[in-house]
Amino acid sequence: MLHHLSSNQSVVESARQSQHPLATTGGRSWFWAITDQGVVSLASFIATVIIGRCCAPEQLGIYSVVISGVWLLGGLLNALVWVPYTSEAPQLTGKRLARYAGSTLVHLAGLLGICVAGLVLTAVVAESLGRFAGINIEFANQIRTFSLIMVPVLVLLMLRNHLRRTAIAHLEMWRLWKIDIPISGLHIVLLLLFARWGILTASTGILALALACGLSLGWLVWLWKQFRFDWRSTKYYLVYNWRFGSWLVGASLAWLLAQNVYRWLVWSQEGLFALGEFSAAFYMAMSLSPLLLAVENVTRALAANRLAEGEEGELRRTTTEMTLILALVFGVLSVILGVFGGELVTAIYGEDYAGQQAVVATLCLGLFVFAVNIPVDSALLALRRGQVVLVASLTQLVLGVGIAAPLMLWLGTVSIGYAMAVSGAGGLIVRWVCFCRSQQRASR
């Protein structure tokens, strides 16, 4: 039988106090999470600046496409590995927790193997189509190259993210610094060295990220004693994770497609040069992501821990308060960045990326709508309403593509931000309606 969130409260309380001490200090958890995410996002932003300034815009476009593809596949891992772990692990102690951690690591390795096989197959098919099916050879070669470049960075970046997400699940935010600072620092150093040696391209920039994330292997060895492996537990938790995350697979992929399809639209309709310009504007708008991602990670972990303590009745009030707070905070930040973002793009990335003021402003609008979706999305995940998340994500995807594709022919890349805002509003309505209904049913 699968474990229920409300079961065995004494065990849960003991686990929370003994193994997850930061669970009782929410303020410190937020501090560590936000500052760590700031380090990660700042390193990622600096990486795009180095590539953007040292290479042509096409190279920044390639870098953007590959990284977005990696995170798209990461959505599969998020749904089937990390979200179930975040929900279940706070309830487990001792050997049960060690067996679940070991089983989760096996699941991660298996899913990564499937993703790598899919990427290699995609490269083979793209090359065959380019040679024998008469499609655009240059486009087919780009797909093949992108697929193969993704393999090493996918494996090592997802291992790093696994260590981060399991630490967050236990609210061990201090560990994030020990993982991320060395990796982020090495990534930037390698990029600067490659630039100095004259070998920096999108491909070598992605290789630098993979090499830096290789430090995660050391952490895996260090933490190895925390894992226990046996076939029965692996099979049991595979079924558990699948039942928990099967709906979230579609939801995660639909959500990530809704976020990344815009870059692929720009690539297919405008080319890599235009994609590079758009990517600079996009990364500038995403400069708010440290706070955004920290809020997302911590609200999900705290929601799961709150439910484990039997506080489901407080969930609606907390979700409402968090939504209002985020609307205020990100409303102000989005306006400021929208006003000055275009000038910052030119100053930071160079004159090749001038003229992106309107693009940055509309992207900030889309980012604001995304931010206010986070609390209710986290609440639905804690309540295991994967079907609702799937429907909301599909709503966003359909609205986003349906609006962006025709508008791009008229407004160009400025239309992307509008499409993100309208699609995010549609997803927000779906999430809140279903969340309120579930709370009403629970109170009866």
Image (spheres, grey):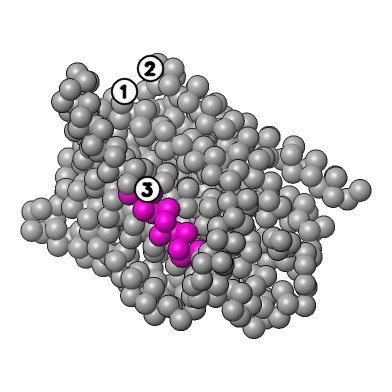
Examine the rendering and report whether any part of residue 353 can be seen: no
On screen, residue 288 versus residue 425, left or right, reads left
Q: Which residue is mark 2?
A: 409
Q: Residue at x 57, y 37 (%)?
A: 393
Q: Residue at x 85, y 45 (%)?
A: 441
Q: Can you tell which quarter of the image residue 398 is in?
A: top right
For the point 47% across and 32% down, the residue is 417
Indicate the amino acid at tag 1: Gln
Question: Is residue 107 covered in magenta?
Answer: yes
Q: For numbered disc 1, what is the local secondary structure?
A: helix
Looking at the rendered image, the disc whose residue lies closer to the viewer, 1 or 3, is 3
Front position among marks 3 and 2: 3
- Amino acid at pointer 2: Leu
Q: Which mark is residue 147?
A: none
Quarter occupied by residue 168: bottom right
Which x, y percent locates residue 162? Answer: 45, 63
In the rendered image, which residue does mark 3 sit on?
115
Helix or strand or loop: what does disc 3 sit on? Answer: helix
Q: Are marks 1 and 2 in contact (CB under 8 Å)?
A: yes
Residue placed under numbered mark 1 in the picture = 269
Mark 2 surroundings: few (<14), some (14-19) or many (≥20) residues within 10 A: few
Number of residues whose C-alpha sits closer than 10 Å to that of mark 1, classed few (under 14), some (14–19) or many (20 or more) = some
**Relative image position of residue 79 (x, y in whole percent):** 54, 50
- Residue 183, compared with residue 18, is above or below; it is above
**Camera sees residue 116:** yes
| Residue 240 to residue 25: above or below | above
- Of helix, strand and loop, which one carries label 2? helix
Which residue in the rendered view is the most extreme toward the front?
232
Q: Report the magenta residues as a range.
A: 104-116
Asked if disc 3 and disc 2 are in contact, CB closer than 8 Å, the reply is no
Counting from the top left corner in percent of width and height, residue 333 is at 52, 48
201 or 165: which is nearer to us?
165
